[in-house]
Amino acid sequence: MFRSAFIIFITLNLILLAACSTTPRRSTQPQLPAQVVLKLKAMPLNTHLPIPVKGISTNQLQDTWGNARSMGRTHEGIDILAPRGTPVTSATEGMIASLQGNTLGGTVIWIIGPAGSWHYYAHLEKQKRGLKVGDIVHVGEVIGYVGNSGNARHTVTHLHYGIYLAGKGRGATNPYPYLR
Ligand SMILES: [Zn+2]
């Protein structure tokens, strides 16, 4: 008797939990402060950017732009190999624009940078604790840690770094020449 009551109690809790998790999530992007966005847009994007992984030097980089990927995609970025947990740093001045993960990238960070550029850091082990959308970041500031989340879970740990010159996911350009 007690046992069945307990099971009903657990079942009810599970139903409640399921109900909570189906609550529609706010799908709109949080409003980013327009003043900061305008200020960033007015800044030039340097033709040389620091490598956004601590301790990695230029001669360790490989140009992996345009390589074939699954589902007929081509590689829109550079893969920077580094041990799990290596700090990932911002390549630019910027503002955290999105921290929403996705199936390909896993744990990711999107940063709005100078001249309307967007910067994508993917396959992270984790984001820096307390990081939130709207935070201002500076060049070289730690934003997360190298991992192999998303579709990199069967590959070596690395940072996927993408530069988009025309907005979030638009105007992909090869980061390699910027990091050389
Ligand atoms: Zn990649």
Image: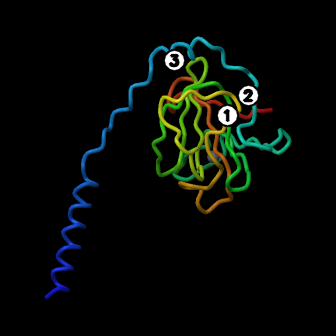
**Where 50 falls versus 156 (above or below)?**
above
Residue 57: percent from left, percent from top: 83, 41
**Where 27 falls versus 85 (above or below)?**
above
Secondary structure at badge 2 equals loop
Secondary structure at badge 1 equals loop
Residue 118: percent from left, percent from top: 56, 28
The quarter of the image holding the N terminus is bottom left
Residue 153: percent from left, percent from top: 58, 60
Instruction: List the residue tagged with mark 2.
Output: 49
Instruction: List the residue tagged with mark 1.
Output: 141
**Where 58 falls versus 47 (above or below)?**
below
Q: How many neighbours does mark 2 have within 10 angstroms: few (below 14), some (14-19), or many (20 or more)? A: some
Q: How many neighbours does mark 1 have within 10 angstroms: few (below 14), some (14-19), or many (20 or more)? A: some
Structural distance between the alpha carbons of marks 2 and 1: 13 Å
**Nearer the camera: disc 2 or disc 1:** 1
Q: How many neighbours does mark 3 have within 10 angstroms: few (below 14), some (14-19), or many (20 or more)? A: some
